Image (tube, coloured by chain):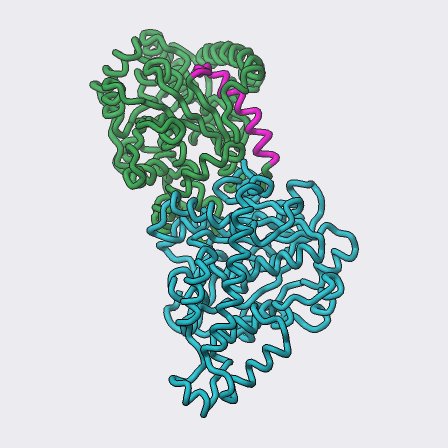
Chain colours: A green, B cyan
Amino acid sequence: MQNSGPKVTPWEVRGEVDYEELIREFGVEPLNEELINRIERHAGYLHVLLRRNVFFAHREFGEWMDSYERGVETVLYTGRGPSGYTHLGHLVPWIFTKYLQDAFKADLYFQVTDDEKFLINPGMSVEEVKRYTDDNLLDIIAVGFDPKRTKIFTNLSYTKELYNIAVRVAKHVTFSTARATFGFTESSNIGIIFFPAMQAAPCFLPQTLKGTDAHVLIPCAIDQEPYWRITRDVAPKLGYRKPAGIYSKFIPGLGAGGKMSASMPETCIFLSDSPEEAKKKIRNAFTGGQPTVREQREKGGDPDVCVVYWYLYYLFDEDDKSVAETYEACRRGNRICGECKEQLAEKVAAFLVEHQRRREGARSILDEFLLRD
Amino acid sequence: MQNSGPKVTPWEVRGEVDYEELIREFGVEPLNEELINRIERHAGYLHVLLRRNVFFAHREFGEWMDSYERGVETVLYTGRGPSGYTHLGHLVPWIFTKYLQDAFKADLYFQVTDDEKFLINPGMSVEEVKRYTDDNLLDIIAVGFDPKRTKIFTNLSYTKELYNIAVRVAKHVTFSTARATFGFTESSNIGIIFFPAMQAAPCFLPQTLKGTDAHVLIPCAIDQEPYWRITRDVAPKLGYRKPAGIYSKFIPGLGAGGKMSASMPETCIFLSDSPEEAKKKIRNAFTGGQPTVREQREKGGDPDVCVVYWYLYYLFDEDDKSVAETYEACRRGNRICGECKEQLAEKVAAFLVEHQRRREGARSILDEFLLRD
């Protein structure tokens, strides 16, 4: 792997991300008006994550909706790498996945890649990953997925079915291809080299379990796309449909630049943060404001680089008129950072209270969701 | 991998094998008199496979017996790659393993590497491997292992426990090491690259299942040794003892040169062959005899290159005096090939009748042996 310049692989997102460039580099399609209108027809409304373009790219999402309209079994698959506690950024694709589940009445297969996180993090024990897993599962369920339509599983607990599919995938993936796709080196361990096959396996799990045709759609952040490129190459060789994908941007942390990352806890709102902790982090967030209130009033701020505005725009202020007013007021110096921070802090605090309430409720229904060997 | 000269890896045995050279190359020890006497003390007798030096090398076998004598749990681990029907050559390490099980009252873990055989053979389907597996299991049980002390499992059926151990092993094995050991190339698939970790896993399975210390001994053909070199490197990093090993020579086929291989059925005695089929193959075997009986009487034969003599010596004539007489009589021209062939044919036919009887009995006790998820 190169060590300079922007870089996006499943294990690394570095530098400023140019999404137009990523669309070209990954060979995916931008989500266009026609597709967005089509989702809206099925869902009955347009999710803010679509209206505001957080989900911005796809692969054969139209074909997946074709399958739905023709009565082919349409299925969702997404996942979580349990390398730490869940933060707000992780939740974005899951919230959107629930929206798709409701809209398309789709079964959802949710993979927790405990094996991957153990294999990729030198200092992390299996026991540590399992602790995070147990914790993360509650956050996943708290999103509100339909228990009748949702199967959650971890690779180290629901192994047999996955490994049986993974060896079939792996047989068609050479080291050369895996290295070119994931940047493996001589010192990569043989577990992480195999892992792409374990991540591909759930694309073929519904067909295996039910013995029927199925069309899988994967909602996820764009950095996961390399996995699906390999999976799509292998699918026809195993007699399955290629999975479709719908991809989100990264969620920034509260500091300057970079996606929200648990490795920088002070810039990261964990779902287990108390409302007060979250408010404090937001009050310390990086903004596009001027150094002083006086300068802000005189020169105006820059919402385009402001993390607080980003969160309001993409997630916490669904009202188009309100968010447009915030933007203009900031630019004209009519609004100071403290006001935006308080607005966001209140929203996030309320969100966390509700999430944590649901999370407590998740403990008693966990077993309804889990697949285990 | 080089394509000329003798070569021994787990997937390839080519050319004339120099066992002295292999001992040096693999860095193992020859089985010496002291060790052999020590086994005899524990077993009450010396197995023909030891007396005749088919098992010829080891790694820390003395230390394993130390553990036994000190009351440390001593365990056996061997395996089978189910890429075809079982032949006589496969049985040699298993017969010896049963001898060790009886002598040391040891638990035996028997791995069937269905994943490996699927991954390494381009044209082989999982279904085909599973057919061979179901068949091979009966041959394994027919050897007579103690059902109370023996657990048999296949990687595609007893996956969770094995994969959970394998990822711990894999984290300590780089691609670079695996390539140097197994000769992987750019076009090796990512499943077979991971497989050494699955083969290593049973070395740590008894400890995992029972939560105790254990000292594992692996009886197997010498070509499997590279796996244990990697496993031994990893063992202390996981807090386990290094497995010991005791290694056999290869069993020749009935043709000229090469180990007995299912890919040359005419030179290979399958355990499912009828006594008549087996006799016919033996009558067509390569020998060290002269082209005509007359020349044989005049010049004598060469038992050292004779496959029929090999089978009598190593397996089917346990009587030291008788086998020495056969050797001398052949060299002096006092015995012709037909006599040796008939002697061997009768022995093998009787062996097959007995094996096939036990094999039928194995169906009803299969479940007592199997570990499954």
Residue B34 or residue B22, whichever sits in front: B34
The quadrant holding residue A92 is top left
The number of numbered badges drawn on the structure is 0
The quadrant holding residue B220 is bottom right
**Residue at the left extreme of this rendering:** A34
Image coords of residue B42 (percent x, y): 74, 61
Residue B225 can be seen, yes or no:
no
Q: Which residues are magenta?
A: A127-148
Residue A112 can be seen, yes or no:
yes
The residue under the point 46% across, 89% down is B297
Q: Is residue A128 left or right of residue A39?
A: right
The quadrant holding residue A57 is top left
Q: Is residue B75 left or right of residue A221?
A: right
Image coords of residue A47 (percent x, y): 34, 14
Residue B160 or residue B52, whichever sits in front: B52
Q: Give above or below for A67 relative to B351.
A: above
The residue under the point 44% across, 66% down is B279
Residue A107 or residue A83, whichever sits in front: A107
Q: Give above or below for B179 relative to A144.
A: below
The residue under the point 50% across, 44% down is B155
Residue A252 or residue B207, whichever sits in front: B207
Image coords of residue A243 (percent x, y): 31, 31
Image coords of residue B62 (percent x, y): 71, 64
- A267 within the magenta span: no
**Residue at the right extreme of this rendering:** B70
Q: Is residue A347 left or right of residue B228?
A: left
State the predominant SS element of the stretch in magenta.
helix
